[in-house]
Image (spheres, rainbow, N blue to C red):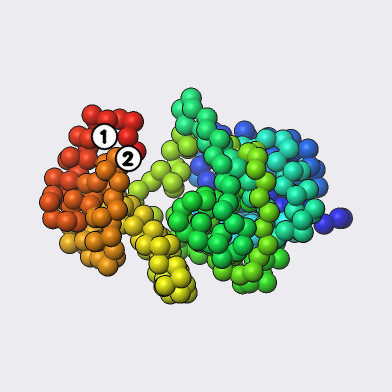
């Protein structure tokens, strides 16, 4: 049996309502030399049975059932069982245009790139947006800075990655992370001299509204701890002078999540990365209610409760401002 050109990895959990849309779009790809790895992460609904049904119909579909360990462990499980020259991930609530694999693979082969990434679409309610991922530079260290600054999206689903990079550089998905696990892997890859090509087209459809179980939409202590782990790791390995702005950004975004989730006390929130408080107060965007109210809390102008009441009021009066 020939080696597949691509392994597609889909972590599956409570996805019975929309899994068909995702899998059908992947099986309809014009590029056909792929394996589709469905990792049933102990899903309590009918998702596992749906996966098995696809495997019986199409030999390219491989199904693995495992006890629930979270999205990071499911992604890692898929990587460990991937036979393709390249890998790409898809989330079960999303879908892809039929030429996605062909165009990414052709670009990878033509340029002998380790990573090929592209634009994508977002869908929320009735609105569709084309999100450009045009990089400022394709040098690995510069791409690392762009991902850390949140200028490029750190998802796995718009990136075709040479599979051997994971073993060559000993890169694994951190099982303790439920958020930013994909960004963690992407940024870790770019601490190494990998080669990259960018394809300025969108193929992947990122659904922001369908999945109520989406970890991106959940603002809880697990997500906060994941981001704190992320910050700790990269603060330890990156030269602070060379990556000062990038380290500030990931700390600021994590501080905002802590503020938004309400899992920390006022004292804990002030002490979380207290070294950036002054810079945050100075650079907060007045048009962003979360940043504005967090900055005024950090400066002592509001109590934590006051800042959240005022933020809610601003959001009600100006519903189209950035929250």
Q: Which mark is residue 323?
A: 2
Q: Is residue 238 above or below residue 162?
A: below
- Pointer 2 local density, CA inside 10 Å: few below 14, some 14–19, many at least 20: some
Of the pair 101 and 209, the residue shown nearer to us: 101
Q: Which mark is residue 130?
A: none
Q: How many marks?
A: 2
Q: Is residue 258 above or below residue 321?
A: below
Marks 2 and 1, how far apart at CA: 7 Å
- Indicate the position of residue 293 as horizontal and vertical percent values: 22, 46
- Indicate the position of residue 238 as horizontal and vertical percent values: 47, 72
- Indicate the position of residue 182 as horizontal and vertical percent values: 53, 56
User: Which residue shows up at 24% across the image and 30% down it?
Assistant: 316
Q: Is residue 6 above or below residue 124?
A: below
Disc 2 element: loop
User: Which residue shows up at 28% across the image and 60% down it?
Assistant: 279
User: Which residue shows up at 29% across the image and 63% down it?
Assistant: 276
Of the pair 151 and 73, the residue shown nearer to us: 151
User: Which residue shows up at 39% across the image and 58% down it?
Assistant: 249
2 or 1: tag closer to the N-terminus: 1
Q: Which residue is mark 1?
A: 315
Q: Are marks 2 and 1 in contact (CB under 8 Å)?
A: yes
- Pointer 1 local density, CA inside 10 Å: few below 14, some 14–19, many at least 20: some
Image quadrant in which you'd find residue 28? top right
């Amino acid at each position: 049996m020939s080696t597949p050109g691509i392994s597609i990895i889909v972590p599956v959990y409570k996805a019975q309502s929309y899994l068909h849309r995702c899998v059908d779009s992947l099986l309809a790809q014009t590029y056909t030399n792929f394996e589709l790895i469905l990792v049933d992460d102990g899903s309590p609904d009918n998702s596992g049975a749906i996966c098995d049904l696809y495997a019986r119909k199409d030999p390219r579909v491989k199904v693995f059932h495992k006890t629930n360990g979270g999205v990071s462990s499911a992604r890692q499980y898929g990587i460990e069982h991937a036979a393709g020259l390249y890998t790409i991930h898809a989330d079960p609530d999303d879908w892809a245009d039929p030429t996605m694999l062909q165009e990414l693979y052709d670009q990878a082969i033509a340029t002998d790139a380790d990573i090929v990434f592209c634009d994508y679409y977002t869908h929320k309610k009735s609105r569709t947006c084309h999100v450009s991922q045009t990089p400022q530079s394709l040098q690995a260290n510069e791409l690392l800075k762009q991902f850390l600054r949140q200028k490029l999206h750190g998802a796995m689903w718009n990136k075709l990655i040479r599979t051997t990079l994971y073993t060559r550089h000993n890169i694994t998905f951190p099982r303790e992370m439920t958020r930013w696990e994909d960004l963690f892997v992407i940024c870790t890859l770019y601490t190494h001299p990998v080669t990259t090509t960018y394809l300025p087209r969108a193929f992947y459809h990122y659904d922001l509204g369908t999945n109520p179980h989406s970890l991106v939409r959940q603002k809880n202590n697990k997500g906060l701890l994941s981001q704190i782990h992320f910050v700790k790791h990269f603060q330890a390995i990156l030269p602070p002078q060379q990556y000062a702005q990038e380290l500030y950004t990931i700390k600021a975004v994590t501080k905002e999540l802590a503020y938004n989730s309400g899992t920390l006390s006022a004292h804990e929130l002030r002490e979380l990365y207290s070294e950036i408080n002054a810079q945050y107060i100075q650079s907060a965007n007045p048009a962003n209610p979360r940043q504005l109210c967090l900055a005024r809390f950090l400066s002592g102008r509001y109590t934590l409760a006051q800042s959240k009441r005022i933020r809610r009021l601003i959001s009600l009066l100006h519903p189209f401002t950035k929250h």
